[in-house]
């Protein structure tokens, strides 16, 4: 098999393993765009895994950053599938290099144990780790319309990352991370100690819902320009957004238990959502 095709197959395995939601939505794309999305996801997954699972994550992230800058100059490990596939993507699409650099910068925020005081702080983090993904994908999904779709693409990243945060509160606490802004804890008189004790009370649910409302507002803003996407990518992008938004409903159905349960949208619900998109 062609080395490039093998590299794309490797990237597909990664997204299929780690994000069934994105995999389901973007499987609807034409072949070339679909493969390109797999490669971008593999890049993002690599950076994420370095931070979450690396033995010496600071040094490993710095090394990866150097590898990316070397890649941009045309030098990369030609035995590494992710770089092989990404090189092919960069040849065929007008990729936003700044978004890739900002993604790496965002992952470094987790290593620096950043404190989030306000929602604006959380949105800044969300831009770097999630909105950047949308900006990476725009040249693949809507070539020539990147400028028109940029703002709402950033908003969709905000919405999706806030959804991640609201779903993964318990998991993040185990990693020593807290993305709930401190001013919301103060507003609802809910302490970090209560959070560490997994106290699912009225105050916690009020905080959760206030952040969810912000997320849902950004989903609504992101949907304003969906009609600007080409027909071939409109359904996958809208599908990904709706599938992610549905996670919030799953958390509510499970009484806000984000401390000991990971919430997923079932396969049946996913298929129902995808089937209703026009």
Image (tube, helix red, strand yellow):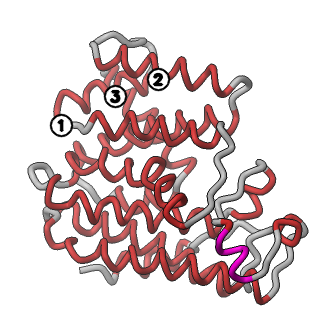
Picture coordinates of residue 77 (x, y %)? Answer: 42, 12
Q: Which mark is residue 218?
A: none
Residue at position x 50%, y 42% from top? 106
Q: Residue furthest left?
A: 144
Going from N to C along the chain, the mark reached first, 2 or 3, is 2
Going from N to C along the chain, the mark reached first, 3 or 1, is 3
**Which is more toward the observer, 179 or 233?**
179
Q: Mark 3 to mark 1: distance in Å?
A: 12 Å
User: Image check: 142 left or right of 172?
Assistant: left
Marks 2 and 3 close (CB-CB < 8 Å): no
Residue at position x 68%, y 86% from top? 206
Find the magenta span and give its range.
183-188
Picture coordinates of residue 254 (x, y %)? Answer: 72, 83
Q: Mark 2 to mark 3: distance in Å?
A: 17 Å
Q: Residues within 10 Å of mark 1 (few under 14, many from 20)?
A: some
Which residue lies under the disc numbered 3?
A: 85
In this figure, what is the number of numbered marks? 3
Report if residue 148 lies within the magenta region: no
Mark 3 or mark 1, whichever is nearer to me: 1
User: Image check: 176 left or right of 61?
Assistant: right
Secondary structure under the numbered disc 1 in the rendered image = loop
Which quarter of the rendering shows the C terminus?
bottom left
Q: Residues within 10 Å of mark 3 (few under 14, many from 20)?
A: many
Q: Quadrant of residue 108?
A: top right
Q: Mark 1 to mark 2: distance in Å?
A: 21 Å
């Amino acid at each position: 098999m062609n080395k490039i095709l093998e590299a794309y197959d490797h990237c597909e395995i990664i997204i299929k393993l780690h994000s069934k939601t994105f995999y389901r939505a973007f499987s609807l794309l034409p072949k070339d765009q679909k493969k390109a999305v797999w490669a971008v996801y593999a890049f993002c997954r690599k950076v994420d895994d370095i931070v979450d699972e690396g033995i010496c994550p600071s040094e490993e992230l710095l090394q990866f950053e150097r590898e990316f800058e070397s890649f941009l100059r045309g030098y990369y490990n030609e035995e590494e599938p992710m770089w092989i596939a990404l090189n092919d993507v960069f040849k065929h699409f007008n990729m936003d290099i700044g978004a890739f650099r900002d993604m790496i910068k965002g992952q470094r925020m987790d290593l620096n144990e950043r404190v989030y005081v306000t929602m604006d702080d959380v949105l800044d983090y969300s831009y770097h780790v999630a909105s950047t993904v949308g900006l990476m994908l725009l040249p693949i999904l809507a070539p020539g319309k990147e400028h028109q779709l940029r703002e709402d693409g950033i908003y969709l990243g905000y919405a999706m990352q806030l959804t991640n945060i609201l779903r993964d509160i318990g998991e993040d606490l185990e990693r020593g991370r807290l993305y709930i802004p401190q001013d919301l804890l103060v507003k609802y008189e809910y302490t970090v100690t209560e959070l560490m004790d997994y106290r699912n009370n009225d105050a916690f649910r009020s905080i959760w819902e206030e952040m969810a409302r912000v997320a849902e507002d950004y989903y609504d803003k992101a949907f304003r320009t969906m009609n600007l996407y080409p027909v071939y990518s409109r359904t996958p992008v809208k599908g990904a957004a709706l599938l992610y938004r549905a996670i919030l409903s799953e958390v509510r159905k499970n009484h806000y238990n984000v401390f000991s349960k990971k919430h997923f949208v079932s396969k049946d619900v996913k298929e129902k959502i995808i089937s209703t998109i026009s």
